[in-house]
């Protein structure tokens, strides 16, 4: 069974552009969370979706949005990119039930120039 | 003050040594996670704890809910254990937001 897959793995964008990052959870996992990890820091929570509904939102501006599709895959969109958006974007999925941990994707490294 | 604090920030040890990484948190939690991150970014989930102690191979994780403290131990450390170890807590029962510590960079010297 494939793990959590994220695409693309690396991306370079120019300030002001828009970017879409994609995540496919493990089969059967209905919950997807997105995190931003700036170099040298711990990941920061951006969004969580469960069954296509937003369940949580972190302290990020409205330039950040996300959605979850019927097959539970998810997209993270960032508009009007700033240099400070350069980071590793991580997606994590989780099986329902309290006894299961998270499975993380390898991330998308976004560089804004 | 961060909600999740880890110590030490950096740890260098000789192969074979017993390693302890500490995590303290200041909020009520539903679960605490220990994660491992290698250069390049991939994160591997090691443990999820809500009470007591768990063991997997050479790794042991403990949590004391009353003291809001958790430890990750590595026995017979090996250079392949070199990585960043991150403690993260789930604080809200309504969603799955994880709040992360800043990590402990572990280097094991052969």
Image (cartoon, coloured by chain):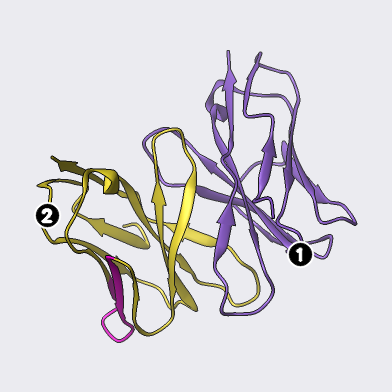
**Quadrant housing the N terminus of chain B:** bottom left
Please give the range of residues in magenta: B58-70
Residue sitting at 42 percent across and 32 percent down? A39
Direction right: furthest residue? A70
Q: CA distance from mark 1 to mark 2?
A: 41 Å
Chain in yellow in the render: B
Residue with the mark numbered 1: A30
Residue tagged 2: B16
**Position of residue A42 in the picture relative to residue A97 (left or right):** left
As drawn, is B67 to the left or to the right of A100? left
Of residues A31 and B17, the one nearer the viewer is B17
Q: Is residue B84 above or below residue A86?
A: below
Question: Which residue sits at x=81%, y=56%?
Answer: A72
Left or right position of A109 against B3: right
The image position of residue B80, as x and y in percent, is 28, 44
Q: Nearer the viewer, mark 1 or mark 2?
A: 2
Chain A colour as displayed:
purple
State the image coordinates of residue A99 (x, y, percent, origin top left): 56, 79
User: Is A24 within the magenta?
Assistant: no
Classify mark 1: helix, strand or loop: loop
Residue for point 72% across, 53% down: A25
At 56% from the left and 62% from the top, the residue drawn is A102
Query: Is there a contact, CB below 8 Å, between mark 1 and mark 2?
Result: no
Q: Position of residue B22 (x, y in %)?
A: 23, 64
- Rendered image: mark on residue B46: none
Give the image quarter of residue B76: bottom left
Query: Quarter holding the C terminus of chain B?
Result: top left
Q: Nearer the viewer, residue B108 or B88?
A: B108
């Amino acid at each position: 069974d494939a793990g959590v897959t994220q695409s693309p793995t690396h991306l370079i964008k120019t300030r002001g552009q828009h970017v879409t990052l994609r995540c496919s959870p493990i089969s059967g996992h209905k919950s997807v969370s997105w995190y931003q990890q700036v170099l040298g820091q711990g990941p920061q929570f951006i969004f969580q979706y469960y069954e296509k509904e937003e369940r949580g939102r972190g302290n990020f501006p409205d330039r950040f949005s996300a959605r979850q599709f019927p097959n539970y895959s998810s997209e993270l969109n960032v508009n009007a990119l700033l240099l400070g958006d350069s980071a590793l974007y991580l997606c994590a999925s989780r099986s329902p039930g309290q006894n299961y941990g998270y499975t993380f994707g390898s991330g998308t490294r976004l560089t804004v120039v | 003050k961060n909600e999740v604090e880890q110590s030490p920030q950096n740890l260098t040890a000789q192969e074979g040594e017993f390693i302890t990484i500490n995590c303290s948190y200041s909020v009520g939690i539903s679960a605490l996670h220990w994660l491992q991150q290698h250069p390049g970014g991939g994160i591997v989930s090691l443990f999820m704890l809500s009470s007591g102690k768990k063991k997997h191979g050479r790794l042991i994780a403990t949590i004391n809910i009353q003291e809001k403290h958790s430890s990750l131990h590595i026995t017979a450390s090996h250079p392949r254990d070199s990585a960043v170890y991150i403690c993260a807590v789930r604080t809200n029962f309504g969603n799955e937001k994880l709040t992360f510590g800043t990590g402990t960079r572990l280097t094991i010297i052969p």
